Image (spheres, rainbow, N blue to C red):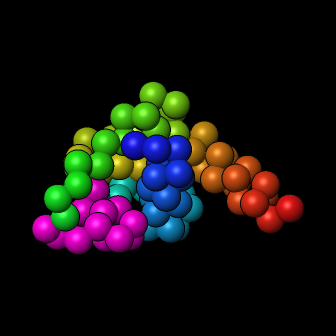
Amino acid sequence: MSRRDLAHVSTALWDLSGGKSGSGVAIADVDVAIGRGRDDMRTPLNLHSLYVEGLVEQLADGTWALTDDGVQRHHDDEGYAGR
């Protein structure tokens, strides 16, 4: 996934979790939030890059959540974008 796509996924996780770290979000919900439909033929979302950076974690129930670092990165990105 491109950096831009990863940013969209991160923003979707932020929006769907209410900006709280550790709040699980289903991949299907992220798909919808970034404009992927049910029968979308694109490669399934892979959050590995965000995981490796420590920005997301997969929870025991299979959902994904922002980490504290992921929440901070979102705040930093939003602050930079607002300049």
Question: Which residue is drawn at the image coordinates 23% and 55% (left, top)?
Answer: 42
Q: Quadrant of the N terminus?
A: top left
Q: Is residue 28 visible?
A: yes
Nearest the viewer among 5 and 56 is: 5
Q: Is residue 66 visible?
A: no
Residue 47 falls inside the magenta stretch: no
Q: Look at the image and give the residue range highlighted in magenta.
A: 27-39
Question: Which residue is drawn at the image coordinates 86% and 62% (left, top)?
Answer: 83
Nearest the viewer among 7 and 23 is: 7
Q: Position of residue 71 (x, y in %)?
A: 60, 50
Q: Give the residue at the far top of this rendering.
A: 52
On the image, which quarter does residue 37 sit in? bottom left
Asked if residue 15 is positioned above or below residue 54 in the image, the reply reads below
Asked if residue 49 is positioned above or below residue 76 in the image, the reply reads above
Please state if 10 lies on the left or on the right of 57 as rendered: right
On the image, which quarter does residue 47 sit in? top left
Please state if 34 lies on the left or on the right of 18 as rendered: left
Question: Which residue is drawn at the image coordinates 52% and 44% (left, top)?
Answer: 3
Q: Position of residue 75 (x, y in %)?
A: 70, 55
Q: Position of residue 26 (x, y in %)?
A: 28, 59
Q: Position of residue 55 (x, y in %)?
A: 52, 39
Residue 28 falls inside the magenta stretch: yes
